[in-house]
Structure formats: C-alpha cells, structure tokens
Amino acid sequence: MRHLTIMAAAGFLVACGSSVDESPWRSQVTTPAMHRIAGQETAVGDFTGTSGRTTTGEVAVFQTTAGYAVSLGSDFSIDNGTGAVVGLGDATGATVILAPLASPTGAQVYGVPASVDIGDFRHVYIWDDTRGVPLGVAQLDLL
C-alpha cells in the first residue's frame, strides 16, 4: 500500500509539471554531517574558503573522555589541501596548529593537546603554514 501511495504522489507531481527536487521545502531540509567521534559536541561551525580556495563543510568540537577534539564532518572538502594543516585561532589567523590535514575530503578527527585551553579559540582554520595564509575558516558557535 505504501508503494502505491508513493507512486501516486510522484504521478501527481509529474502531472502538475513539478518534481520532488523543485519543491520549495527541499532547500529547508539539511542533512547533518557525520562525525567519526563519540562525545559531547560543544561547538559547531561551517567552513568558508579563503585565499582563492574552495573550502566547505561542517566542523565541530567534541569533549571526549580523552579531552577535546576537532572533527571535520563527512561533508568537508577543500579543492587543494596540499601542505595544509588544521589549526585553532582567532579572527586574525591560526595560532595553534593541531596536525597536517589528513585528507582533502571527508570526516577526520584531530586531538587538541591538553595544554591548549579550547575556550580561548572561536575559529578552526585550514591553514597553509608555509605561506602563512588561511585556506578555509570556520567560526565556532558554542552549543
């Protein structure tokens, strides 16, 4: 019965000259990024590309039993991450480098050293450490 209902709805949309993709509600529904970490999510943000790079995707900070970690979501992507690092910083740039970027796409996790006070930082950077320029930045919103 469910299959018939779905088919009838699809037929109605086609007959009206519309499709599911053209629905005005489609843009309001977002699929959250998946993170490869368990713990309490404490802050979240979305990357914006800088320095001519295209950097997108969600980033979150998690508190785990081992400490804090920065998690790039499954939707993370940078057009060229060669030589990039992941860092924490303020509005002017990265001041703490966590590690080299493991991959230009996908979910990945970076531990925050215990000596770093995560509360001092409101931005996560994808940083070109050689040139000292940001390739992507996400402002964190506390949860």
Image (spheres, grey):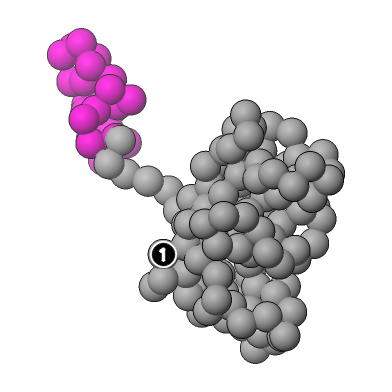
Q: What residue lies at 53% left-to-right and 47% top-to-bottom? A: 47
Q: Position of residue 100 (x, y in %)?
A: 81, 55
Of helix, strand and loop, which one carries label 1?
strand
The residue closer to the viewer here, 6 or 56, is 56
The residue closer to the viewer here, 90 or 70, is 90
- Examine the image and state in which quarter residue 131 appears: top right
Which amino acid does the dot numbered 1 rest on?
Asp
Stretch in magenta:
1-26
Residue that mark 1 sits on: 141
Disc 1 residue crowd, few under 14, some 14–19, many 20+, Cα 10 Å: some
Q: Is residue 129 left or right of residue 125?
A: right
- Examine the image and state in which quarter residue 37 appears: bottom right
Q: What residue lies at 47% left-to-right and 69% top-to-bottom? A: 43
Q: What residue lies at 21% left-to-right and 30% top-to-bottom? A: 24
- Examine the image and state in which quarter residue 108 appears: bottom right
Q: Is residue 19 left or right of residue 112?
A: left
Up-down relation of residue 27 to residue 128 (above or below): above
Q: Is residue 25 left or right of residue 109?
A: left
The reply to whether residue 3 is visible in this rendering is yes
Q: Position of residue 116 (x, y in %)?
A: 68, 80
